[in-house]
Amino acid sequence: MAIKHDLVAVLDFGAQYAMLIARRVRECNVYCEILPHNVTVSELKRRKVKGIIISGGPASVYDKGAPYPDPNLLRSGIPILGICYGTQLIAKALGGVVKPEKKKEYGRTELLVDDETNLFAGLPNHLTCWMSHGDSVVKLPKGFKVLAHTKNTPLAAIGNPKEKLYGVQFHPEVAHTESGVEIIKNFVYVVCGCKPTWTTKNFVEESIKEIKATVGKEKILCALSGGVDSTTVSALVSKAVGKQLTCMFIDQGFMRKNEAKKINDIFTTRFKIKFVHIDASQRFYNKLSGVTDPEEKRHRIGNEFIRVFEEEAKKLGKMPYLAQGTLYPDVIESAVPGLTSTTAVRIKTHHNVGGLPKDIKFKLVEPLKKLFKDEVRALGRELGVPEDIISRQPFPGPGLAIRIIGEVTPERVKILQEVDDIVVSEVKKAGFYKKVWQSFGVLLPIRTVGVMGDKRTYLNTVAIRAVTSTDAMTADWARLPYDLLDTIANRIVNETPTVNRVVYDISSKPPSTIEWE
């Protein structure tokens, strides 16, 4: 009998950290989903939501056209926690007053706890919190009391314990807030009464049942890239349907140096699954000829992947299902209607989500599409996926095509393969491979003047990109040692004859993305 997990919903009002809030709730072993800010109370009750977190957002509650939830939400009886904009929304909707502050509050701030029950139960009365707001609640609604304050924000946390309505002006979901996860745990466990049943083991058991029910006795194809996501999917589907599964690796020509051979070796010697290797590189190069727009690249690659899968699947007999390693961040960043919040903005189309053709012949099986990367790694370990695959840095489905700015040609891919190989090998040698989220090279569409062997050169420029992150939704540039960067740069210009300049990308996400395209 399947476990019925308690559900906490994050209502997304356009917050930068909406994904992070959901991750924090899941870290409490409670299932959490992000829903549109205007989801109806009837839908929330139909889904038996046990708690709601109203996210922050860029709007001001007193602005014309500011987003508001279902008018009945605050009277629904469902426990609610507002964060930043969510707090202001609760206060204003229930008769409180919100005003712009003369002195805005950003960054780390000392929080003084006034009420050590409910949200702050068991926590110190002095905490460091992370503020990011220009508006504040200046008058409490009826029935509310002050739970915590800061020097500049007298109403930094408010609550109505009787109605189970709470609000915090700071961001408990970010790592900069001391005991932030404990505050969320108190809301989820103490206020909402949720049980911690959302575990990797339970997910495996439930996914296997769901895959079996979906696929039945039909055959299923798995899109395999050799990374942790697709390998975990293949292990999960294999556990569910066994010999009905065939894994297919399509080499689109944009893989890392010797990657195709490595993947072929791994899946023919270490895994007991049907494995097919297709070299379709020329088809993909033809599709990208003359294309420089990043979104167009992703769409064409996504479309061509499916066309190759469809054609090759016919050779294997009737195979109506295609499994792929789509993750929750892929879905969110692609902002596909019907899959994401109404306030979500498309950042980039992931080739396996928004890049798929509308007339796809397969029925998709995507068991990971509600999981974050760290959850997938845990799932892979539970399924026995080898650690060297589990710990691999993420590699985009479109491969080096989106790390080559401008047109993608075999010659330019060859340059970046050599550069990327140097970056990754030196990062590994220095012991930083598992300390950073991703580290790679980017080939830029510019050439610069240089001097090599007393001669003038006019050659390619490459960028080194390395970031730290926990979920890829936000990231900070990695402070790699100067000596390591020096070694990488020296090797690149000495071993790659067409490159004479190396730069280091020190931008974080946001405002940048991790990949350049």
Image: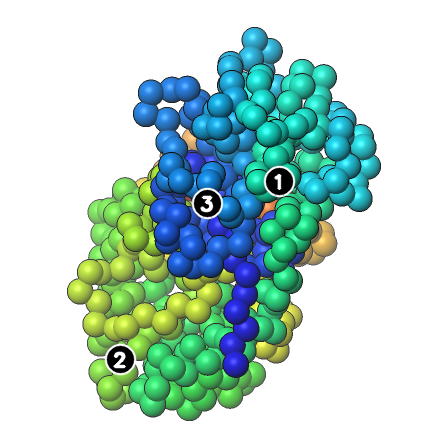
CA gap between label 3 and label 1 equals 13 Å
Kind of element beneath mark 1: loop
Characterize the local packing of mark 1: few (<14), some (14-19) or many (20 or more) Cα atoms within 10 angstroms: few
| Side (left or right) of 144 relative to 250 | right
| Side (left or right) of 86 relative to 359 | right
> Residue 76 — which label?
3
Q: Residue at the spot x=48%, y=28% of the render?
A: 94
The answer to whether residue 429 of the structure is visible from this angle is yes
Sequence order check, earlier mark of 3 and 1: 3
Vertical position of residue 405 compared to residue 392: above or below: above
Question: 193 or 271: which is nearer to us?
Answer: 193
Q: Residue at the spot x=42%, y=52% of the render?
A: 44
The residue where tag 2 is placed is 320
CA gap between label 2 and label 3 equals 43 Å
Q: Position of residue 369 (x, y in %)?
A: 43, 61
What sort of colour scheme is used for the picture? rainbow
What type is the residue that disc 1 sits on? Lys
Q: Residue at the spot x=48%, y=75% of the render?
A: 207
Sequence order check, earlier mark of 2 and 3: 3
Q: Residue at the spot x=48%, y=55% of the render?
A: 49
* Residues at marks 2 and 3 touching, judged by CB atoms closer than 8 Å: no
Picture quadrant of residue 275: bottom left
